[in-house]
């Protein structure tokens, strides 16, 4: 019989955190969701608020925190370039001070701690597809550095706590993930294109749209994350989690136009500074260590996401993105 655990999920009201909370509760655990709501609202967790196994604490992880728990998942950090660049200093504080506080908490409690790292640690990669032993190509002083270098420093801290204190750590490098509960207005490409297509606005292609990404559906990602957490102590990562099926931004836009039946136009805008030209995970390590690979094809995942936004945008209290 599975033992009920008390699990801390930081960033638990965000896109991934709220799906993770659902999954952990479904598996008979109790969840403490810690969030400062800087890149989410409570909408994503409104269905959990009165659940007996769910508790919400409003807190900023750059400040110390204490609670007795059995496991910690650290997902707190704005993930979209628009959001993390709004207050870059706070993004750094979140990644670095947040990592210190959660690692200290895990050390005091003797519990495992998961870190949501990112494909952004590879920067604008010169090695393709990206394997975990590639050290990356990051501009340390550019506009994306607050996120990329913050996450890189957090990884360093996780591995130093492992080496110095023997802590049980699990580091996942998450590649672009999409699905229901993305914020309509946070600027990520999948949510932007779907909302633009559904509201007959032009689709905003940055650059010529030739840059590539590989998009993973949220259910696959949550499965990968929880499998990693369940591995024996010697499995620390870093481990890539993502869908190796790569497409250009133009291809993504055309697929979304076809699936929505939209007549929106594709309009090119300047490419943001340091925007990575290509990205695709090598998931050999995840396949071999976790027996995991994504199962949801892009079109199926996009259909579910489009359905979510159709319902969400029709609510009278919702704002459309600027
Ligand atoms: P999100 O912005 O939807 O969720 C992040 C959550 O963290 C939000 O609820 C936000 O309010 C909260 N938060 C931010 N700073 C905080 C702080 N200082 N204290 C407490 N709460 C704070 O993003 P997401 O897509 O759910 O991403 C979750 C995690 O996964 C992030 O750490 C992100 O870096 C990582 N990640 C996500 C992706 C992706 O494609 N979604 C890719 C790579 C890595
Ligand atoms: N992008 C785009 N139009 C948009 C939003 C994003 O062309 O409206 C591009 C962006 O320049 C990047 C890719 O889509 O090349 C993915 O962007 P996103 O912000 O979703 O994620 P990230 O850059 O962090 O991978």
Image (cartoon, helix red, strand yellow):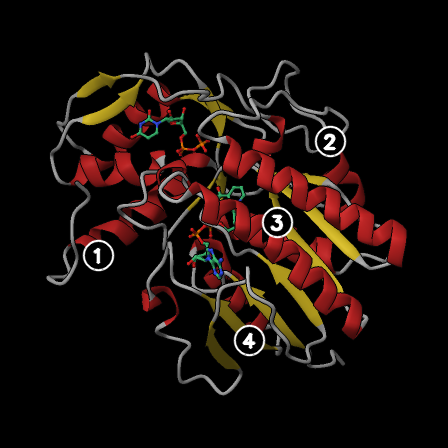
Residue drawn at (50%, 80%) of the image: 54
Disc 3 target residue = 96
**Where does residue 226 sit, x and y in percent of width and height?**
66, 58
Q: Which mark is residue 207?
A: none
Camera-nearest residue between 114 and 290: 114
**Where does residue 179 sit, x and y in percent of width and height?**
40, 48
**First reached walking from the N terminus: tag 4 or tag 2:** 4
- Report crowding for label 3: few under 14, some 14 to 19, many 20 or more residues within 10 A (C-alpha): many
**First reached walking from the N terminus: tag 2 or tag 1:** 2
Relative height, residue 28 to residue 271 (above, below): below
Between circles 3 and 1, the one closer to the viewer is: 3
Q: Are marks 4 and 1 in contact (CB under 8 Å)?
A: no
Q: Which mark is residue 311?
A: 1
Between circles 4 and 3, the one closer to the viewer is: 3
Q: Which mark is residue 132?
A: 2
Disc 4 target residue = 32
Camera-nearest residue between 275 and 51: 275
Residue drawn at (51%, 69%) of the image: 34
User: Seen in the image, is 44 located left or right of residue 320?
Assistant: right
Residue drawn at (74%, 32%) of the image: 284
Task: Tell which quarter ligand 2 is in.
Answer: top left
State the separation of the CA atoms marked 4 and 1: 28 Å
**Where does residue 59 sit, x and y in percent of width and height?**
48, 69
Residue drawn at (17%, 58%) of the image: 318
- Report crowding for label 2: few under 14, some 14 to 19, many 20 or more residues within 10 A (C-alpha): some
Q: Are marks 2 and 1 in contact (CB under 8 Å)?
A: no
């Amino acid at each position: 019989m599975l033992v009920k655990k008390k699990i801390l999920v930081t960033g638990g009201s965000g896109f991934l955190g709220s799906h993770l909370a659902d999954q952990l509760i479904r598996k008979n655990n109790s969840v403490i969701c810690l969030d400062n709501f800087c890149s989410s609202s409570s909408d994503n967790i409104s269905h959990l608020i009165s659940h007996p196994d769910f508790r919400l604490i409003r807190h900023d992880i750059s400040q110390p925190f204490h609670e007795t728990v059995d496991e910690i998942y650290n997902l707190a950090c704005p993930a979209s370039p628009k959001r993390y660049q709004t207050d870059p200093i706070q993004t750094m504080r979140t990644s670095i001070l947040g990592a210190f506080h959660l690692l200290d908490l895990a050390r005091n409690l003797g519990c495992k701690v998961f870190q949501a790292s990112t494909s952004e640690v590879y920067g604008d990669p010169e090695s393709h597809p990206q394997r975990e032993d590639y050290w990356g190509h990051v501009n340390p002083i550019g506009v994306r550095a607050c996120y990329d270098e913050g996450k890189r420093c957090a990884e360093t801290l996780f591995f130093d706590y492992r080496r110095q204190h023997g802590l049980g750590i699990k580091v996942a490098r998450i590649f672009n993930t999409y699905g229901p509960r993305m914020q309509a207005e946070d600027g990520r490409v999948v949510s932007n294109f779907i909302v633009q297509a559904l509201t007959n606005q032009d689709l905003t292609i940055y650059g010529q749209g030739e840059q590539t990404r590989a998009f993973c559906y949220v259910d696959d990602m949550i499965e990968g994350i929880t499998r990693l957490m369940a591995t024996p102590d010697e499995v620390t990562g870093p481990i890539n989690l993502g869908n190796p099926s790569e497409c250009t931004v133009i291809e993504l836009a055309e697929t979304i136009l076809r699936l929505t039946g939209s007549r929106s136009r594709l309009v090119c805008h300047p490419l943001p500074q340091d925007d990575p030209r290509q990205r695709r995970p090598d998931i050999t390590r995840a396949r071999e260590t976790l027996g995991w690979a994504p199962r949801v094809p892009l079109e199926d995942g996009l259909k579910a996401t489009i359905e979510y936004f159709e319902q969400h945008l029709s609510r009278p209290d919702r704002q459309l993105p600027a």
